């Protein structure tokens, strides 16, 4: 069982707070606004570690590192990289402090300063940026104070204004001071024990060659060697020491010995590798955390769509509509997707797409029967409705040339695979039939409104859907309290028997699945339709609801959806929900650059003579940061693959102190040496050419990214509060 602290740490599914907070005066330096991904620590964040940067301020740092910069300039740049890298990831997810060190002119006399030094070194050290105000009664931490670290360094001149000599590098004294500071932070926060214990780490940036306390000897005497102090901190307090060397070969060798004793394997000479090692250290802390179970709180909403031919007609069902004028177009361009994506005060300004798992089904005629699932319940699927309902998606020559050209049109339905985010999901296209009727030659005909077939399909699928998501290995889990709803959209009267419609609706209502009914368009205002819609609303809600009139306009339709969602979510939020659960960020899927655009038509030269699977088109629309587990992104999230993290590894202390759970390649011993088709679905192509597209391909990535992973950028990035991102591979084929 992984440790869980503070009830939960906001990892995989939180929307999060991305803006930084203003900071107090720290060490006499006024801080600026924090980095963009800084989230202040609270109930729903993980317990941030305390990182102390110990920066060599000896005059040896004034020597040239390369032809363009001094060692001091390189060290300052390294600190800035730690703070700013990956959109402030390290500074936003740790408590940072900064200490500079030199030497103590009189080790026997407290309070001594170095002649000529105006930077504030006293007894060989200066804490420029502390973790908190030690005099404050509550000892509250400064949140996100990496900007304070940068500001402090900007205000400090090079050691002795660039002089070649004058300040030594009493690194051993700095190590002892760091050890005392870590002990002090622990003593000042006695509540931070067990799972809430704050993990420490020391980062030493040095030219490597150390001196005795009074700067009279270099690399002497043995009592001044900093390595034994690092070893003691590692073995007895589980405090690793990470080391960046900005010195020559001799100095780098000393720095390596310090890192080896401190449990991190070896020193590095590149700031980027130090940053990777620190991110890996954060990762190990994150991996100790067990996320909240949020998915069951998301309601499952199935949209049941009227697929009768009248949805393609206008002017009282007398003539086919032009592009953008039909009720079918209204559902596609100004309907479900827009409603789910509209922000609402009910969810603190976020949209219903961030807190729902949706699917869609369609019904039409009964001979041949046209009911089918367009898309099963899955997170972040609102955006696929546009593709599924787009007449262009199902328009292929010779049966279809102009999808709004009027009858006769023979549709060629398509099957698409959405591989990311979440589990692989099949989505199918559909358009009502547009056959030629001699009685209404200008209107589409052929698909009736046999609503009971759609209701029976959804009713039959509910048991399977519930059983599937209640399985322990379900990618998006539910439980007995998870709410299931239907939203039934009708454009007029139905062709079914009342008894069949009533039976399905009342049975689902009895099973706890409420059906909201929407009357869409002018035909829904006719007396017969109003009576039927009223009855369906009552049957589907246990007599508690009327139907929602949507008219023919986008405004009216959106108002109806808003009223339905408000009623739905008022009920959902009455269920106890983990306070650290929030919602999903669907990123590229609902906002990607191919939403609203049909996939390319299959190549007619395909070997079967009908259609082909197009090549995968991957959309990696950027989100505010990066993705969660198993989701590929394009933004600059931190990475912790073997090529970087193996450079600095954290071993295991030789005591029973809490470990950092890393590889043991750098672990010291006590002598300091290194160790070693859905149910009930019928055919959906009236011309008999339809075929089921088959199951999702085996190359689809599983998992919904709902929890933190053990490796890689997915979990690292989830700290900033994002859930599911990006539209993955989409495979299209004719049904």
Image: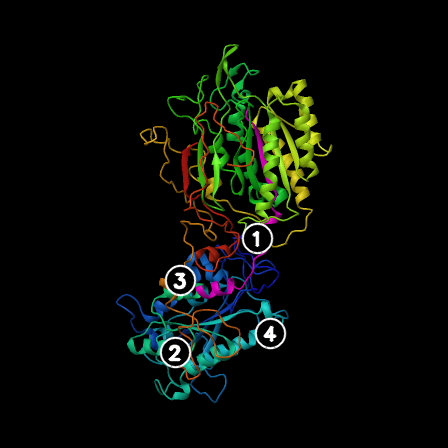
Q: Tell me the mark number nearer the camera, choosing from 4 and 1.
A: 1
Q: Earlier in the sequence, mark 4 or mark 1?
A: 4
Which corner quadrant of the image does residue 611 belong to?
top left
Q: CA distance from mark 4 to mark 2?
A: 34 Å
Where does residue 121 sit, x and y in percent of width and height? 45, 77
- Dot 1 or dot 3, earlier in sequence: 3
Contact, mark 4 vs mark 1 (Cβ under 8 Å)? no
* SS assignment at label 3: helix
Q: Which residues are magenta?
A: 280-307
Q: Residues within 10 Å of mark 4 (few under 14, many from 20)?
A: some
Residue 41 placed where, x, y %?
A: 57, 61
Q: Secondary structure at mark 4?
A: helix
Residue corresponding to mark 3: 81
Q: CA distance from mark 1 to mark 3?
A: 42 Å
Residue at numbered disc 2: 674
- Which residue occupies 30% across, 67% down? 69
Q: Which mark is residue 188?
A: 4
Residue 89 visible to the viewer: yes
- Write the residue at 35% across / 70% down: 268
């Amino acid at each position: 069982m992984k440790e869980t602290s503070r009830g939960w740490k906001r990892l995989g599914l939180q929307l999060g707070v991305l803006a930084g907070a203003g900071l107090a005066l720290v060490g006499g330096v006024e801080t600026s606004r924090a980095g963009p991904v800084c989230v202040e620590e609270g109930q729903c964040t993980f317990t941030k570690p305390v990182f102390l940067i110990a920066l060599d301020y000896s005059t040896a740092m004034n020597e040239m590192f390369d032809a363009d910069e001094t060692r001091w300039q390189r060290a300052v740049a390294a600190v800035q990289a730690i703070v700013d890298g990956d959109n402030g990831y390290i500074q936003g997810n740790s408590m940072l402090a900064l200490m500079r060190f030199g030497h103590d002119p009189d080790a026997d006399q407290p309070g001594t300063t170095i002649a000529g030094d105006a930077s504030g070194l006293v007894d060989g050290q200066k804490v420029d940026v502390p973790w908190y105000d030690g005099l404050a009664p509550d000892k509250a931490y400064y949140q996100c104070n990496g900007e304070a670290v940068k500001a402090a360094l900007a205000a400090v001149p090079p050691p002795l204004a660039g002089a070649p000599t004058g300040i030594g590098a009493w690194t051993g004294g700095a190590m002892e001071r760091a050890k005392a500071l870590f002990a002090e932070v622990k003593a000042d926060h006695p509540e931070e024990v067990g799972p809430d214990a704050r993990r420490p780490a020391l980062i030493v940036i040095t030219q490597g060659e150390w001196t005795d306390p009074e700067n009279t000897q270099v690399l002497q005497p043995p009592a001044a060697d900093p390595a034994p102090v690092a070893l003691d901190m590692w073995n007895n307090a589980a405090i690793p020491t990470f080391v960046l060397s900005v010195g020559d070969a001799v100095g780098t060798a000393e720095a390596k010995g310090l890192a080896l004793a401190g449990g991190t394997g070896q020193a590095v000479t590149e700031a980027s590798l130090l940053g990777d090692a620190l991110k890996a250290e954060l990762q190990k802390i994150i991996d100790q955390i067990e996320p909240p179970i949020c998915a069951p709180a998301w309601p499952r909403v199935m949209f049941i769509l009227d697929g009768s031919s009248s949805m393609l007609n206008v002017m009282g069902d007398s003539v086919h509509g032009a592009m953008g004028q039909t009720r079918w177009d209204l559902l596609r361009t100004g309907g479900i997707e827009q409603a789910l994506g509209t922000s609402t005060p009910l969810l603190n300004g976020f949209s219903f797409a961030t807190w729902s798992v949706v699917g869609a089904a369609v019904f039409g005629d009964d001979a041949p029967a046209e009911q089918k699932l367009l898309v099963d319940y899955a997170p972040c699927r609102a955006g696929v409705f546009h593709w599924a309902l787009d007449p262009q998606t199902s328009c292929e020559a010779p049966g279809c040339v102009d999808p709004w050209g009027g009858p006769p049109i023979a549709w060629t339905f398509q099957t698409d695979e959405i591989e990311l985010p979440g589990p692989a999901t099949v989505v199918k296209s559909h358009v009502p039939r547009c056959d030629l009727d001699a009685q209404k030659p200008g209107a589409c005909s052929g698909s009736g409104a046999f609503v009971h077939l759609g209701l029976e399909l959804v009713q039959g699928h509910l048991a399977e859907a519930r059983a599937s998501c209640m399985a322990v290995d379900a990618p998006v889990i539910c439980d007995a309290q998870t709410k299931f709803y239907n939203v039934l959209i009708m454009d007029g009267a139905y062709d079914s028997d009342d008894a069949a419609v009533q039976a399905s609706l009342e049975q689902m209502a009895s099973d706890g699945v409420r059906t909201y009914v929407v009357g869409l368009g002018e035909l829904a205002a006719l007396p017969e339709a109003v009576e039927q819609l009223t009855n369906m609303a009552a049957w589907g809600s246990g007599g508690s609801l009327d139907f929602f009139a949507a008219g023919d306009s986008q405004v009216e339709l959106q108002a109806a959806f808003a009223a339905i969602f408000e009623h739905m979510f008022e009920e959902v939020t009455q269920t106890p929900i983990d306070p650290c659960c929030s919602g999903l960020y669907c990123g590229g899927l609902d906002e990607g650059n191919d939403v609203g655009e049909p996939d390319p038509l299959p190549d007619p030269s395909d070997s079967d003579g009908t259609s082909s699977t197009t090549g995968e088109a991957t959309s990696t629309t950027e989100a505010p940061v990066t993705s969660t587990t198993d989701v590929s992104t394009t933004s600059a999230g931190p990475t912790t693959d073997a090529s970087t993290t193996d450079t600095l590894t954290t071993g295991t202390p030789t005591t029973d102190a809490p470990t950092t759970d890393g590889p043991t390649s750098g672990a010291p011993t006590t002598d300091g040496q290194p160790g070693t088709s859905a149910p009930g679905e019928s055919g959906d192509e009236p011309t008999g050419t339809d075929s089921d597209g088959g199951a999702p391909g085996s190359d689809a990535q599983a998992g919904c990214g709902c929890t933190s992973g053990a490796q890689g950028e997915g979990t690292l990035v989830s700290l900033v509060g994002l859930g599911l991102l990006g539209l993955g591979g989409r495979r299209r084929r004719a049904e």
